[in-house]
């Protein structure tokens, strides 16, 4: 009996010992698990806050240890992947910002995915506001541009549209579809390229006008010369006075043709950047030379050419022949378009605020209409075509003058009142090349 009781007590003790051991292990495991879960929660919160440098401690073993290692590896992969994506996004943004055209990426629903500052300026949007994520309908204010976007965004075709806007601004808008990767049918948006081609269109129009004007200006004297030569050839009985009159006209038209060709070649050489040897040029000496050249023509119309130089010793660094041509063109122009008994004044002074030398060529001639002031320096532009041809103008003098002034780093403007007179103002930097 005692033996059975002893064995039973021994069994109870053994069970109690095992139970206690299991309880201790279970408590330790629970504490470890709670501590692990607490750490896991803390690390996962940091990861969700983009703190990818954080890691789980890997002191635990077994399945929890394996989970810790896998989780840490996943954080590392996420960190490197996000870093790579951010770097590529930075590269893409830098590239887009450096493009001189307006660039937009728009998804199929019209949401702006990417836009550079040039595009914002072209769309008259605030460059400081982030437009990404907004619908283009709420961003594009110009009605014409908005109509183009609405019509072609999401199109499967490449579209190129030239748009004439206010103030003679011309945009070329190119819209290309964006396809889902490895698909030629699933459109996910559009890439829009906006280019300001106002100057290109203007230059193209000027080129066309120049070709048309040159053709006309060359054809007119050539037709006249050809006509009188044919008349002289087929009429042997023309009297001497008539023949001489015809020859005078041929000579006059030939000289006009020669002058026109010389002016075209001169203008071309200036625009192409002729290789010049710059020298020290004294402006007052150049004026005196021009005065002597034009004195006879001025006196024949009883026109007085006066001067008022603030500094007769003022020098600039430039090509002397070009400087002389500027003075000659503007003084001669004043004489041509000033009636008899008129007055021309060449005045030099300083604009010390802007560090410029200013030369004014003022006359009390026929003046220039207000609507012609913006075009007076265009090639072949004439306010009065018939009068210009009668006095021997080629229509290139002021265009040549403008380019010569620009070659000195300067600028030329005109102020004029019809019937009162004109004032051509040349400004040249004190430090010229």
Image: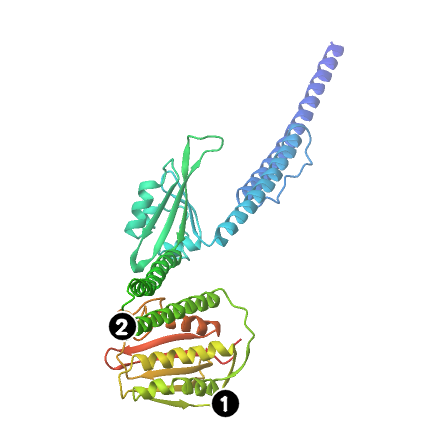
Q: Where residue 155 sits: x, y (%)?
A: 36, 37
Residue at horizontal 36 percent and vertical 70 percent from the top: 256
Q: Do the residues labelled 2 and 1 touch (CB within 8 Å)?
A: no
Task: Quadrant for the N terminus, please.
Answer: top right
Q: Is residue 342 shown to the viewer in this render?
A: yes
Q: Where residue 20 sits: x, y (%)?
A: 67, 25
Marks 2 and 1, how far apart at CA:
58 Å
Left or right placement of residue 182 versus residue 163 in this view: right
- The quadrant holding residue 289 is bottom left
Left or right placement of residue 207 versus residue 409 in this view: left
Q: Which mark is residue 239?
A: 2
User: What element does badge 1 sit on?
Assistant: loop
Residue situated in front as seen by the camera: 35 or 280: 280
User: What element does badge 2 sit on?
Assistant: loop
Report the mark closest to the observer, 2 or 1: 2
The single residue placed furthest to the right in the displayed view is: 3
The single residue placed furthest to the top in the displayed view is: 1
Residue at horizontal 69 percent and vertical 26 percent from the top: 21
Q: Is residue 396 shown to the viewer in this render?
A: no
The 10 Å Cα crowd at callout 1, few under 14, some 14 to 19, many 20 or more, is few
Q: Mark 1 points at which residue?
A: 313
Residue situated in front as seen by the camera: 12 or 336: 336
The 10 Å Cα crowd at callout 2, few under 14, some 14 to 19, many 20 or more, is few
Q: Where residue 78 sits: x, y (%)?
A: 58, 39
Residue situated in front as seen by the camera: 270 or 229: 229
Residue situated in front as seen by the camera: 253 or 283: 253
Q: Where residue 151 sits: x, y (%)?
A: 31, 41
Picture layout, residue 356 above or below residue 196:
below
Picture layout, residue 338 above or below residue 33:
below
């Amino acid at each position: 009996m005692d033996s059975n009781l002893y064995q039973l007590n021994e069994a109870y003790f053994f069970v109690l010992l095992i139970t206690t051991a299991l309880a201790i292990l279970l408590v330790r495991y629970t504490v470890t698990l709670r501590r692990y879960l607490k750490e896991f929660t803390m690390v996962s919160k940091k990861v969700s806050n983009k703190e990818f440098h954080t890691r789980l401690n890997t002191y635990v073993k077994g399945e929890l240890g394996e989970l810790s290692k896998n989780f840490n590896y996943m954080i590392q992969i996420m960190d490197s992947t996000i870093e790579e994506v951010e770097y590529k996004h930075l590269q893409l943004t830098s590239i887009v910002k450096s493009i001189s055209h307006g660039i937009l990426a728009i998804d199929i629903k019209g949401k702006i995915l990417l836009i550079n500052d040039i595009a914002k300026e072209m769309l008259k949007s605030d460059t400081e506001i982030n437009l990404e994520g907004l619908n283009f309908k709420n961003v594009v204010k110009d009605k014409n541009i908005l109509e183009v976007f609405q019509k072609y965004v999401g199109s499967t075709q490449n579209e190129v549209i030239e748009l004439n806007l206010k103030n003679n601004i011309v945009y070329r808008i190119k819209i290309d579809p964006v396809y889902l990767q490895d698909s030629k049918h699933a459109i996910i948006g559009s890439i829009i390229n906006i280019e300001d081609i106002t100057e290109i269109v203007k230059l193209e129009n000027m080129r066309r006008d120049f070709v048309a004007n040159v053709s006309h200006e060359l054809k007119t004297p050539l037709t006249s010369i050809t006509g009188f030569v044919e008349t002289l050839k087929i009429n042997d009985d023309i009297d001497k006075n008539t023949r001489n009159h015809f020859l005078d006209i041929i000579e006059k038209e030939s000289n006009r043709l020669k002058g026109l060709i010389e002016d075209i070649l001169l203008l071309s050489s200036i625009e192409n950047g002729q290789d010049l040897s710059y020298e020290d040029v004294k402006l007052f000496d150049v004026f005196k030379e021009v005065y002597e050249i034009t004195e006879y023509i001025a006196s024949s119309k009883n026109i007085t050419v006066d001067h008022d130089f603030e500094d007769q010793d003022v020098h600039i660094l430039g090509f002397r022949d070009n400087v002389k041509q500027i003075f000659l063109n503007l003084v001669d122009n004043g004489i041509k378009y000033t009636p008899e008994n008129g007055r021309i004044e060449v005045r030099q002074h300083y604009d010390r605020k802007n560090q410029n030398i200013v030369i004014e060529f003022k006359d009390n001639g026929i003046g220039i209409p207000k609507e012609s002031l913006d075009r007076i320096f265009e090639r072949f532009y004439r306010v009065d075509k018939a009068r210009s041809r009668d006095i021997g103008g080629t229509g290139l003098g002021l265009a040549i003058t403008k380019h010569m002034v620009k070659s000195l780093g300067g600028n030329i403007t005109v102020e004029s009142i019809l019937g009162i007179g004109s004032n051509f103002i040349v400004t040249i930097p004190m430090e010229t090349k």
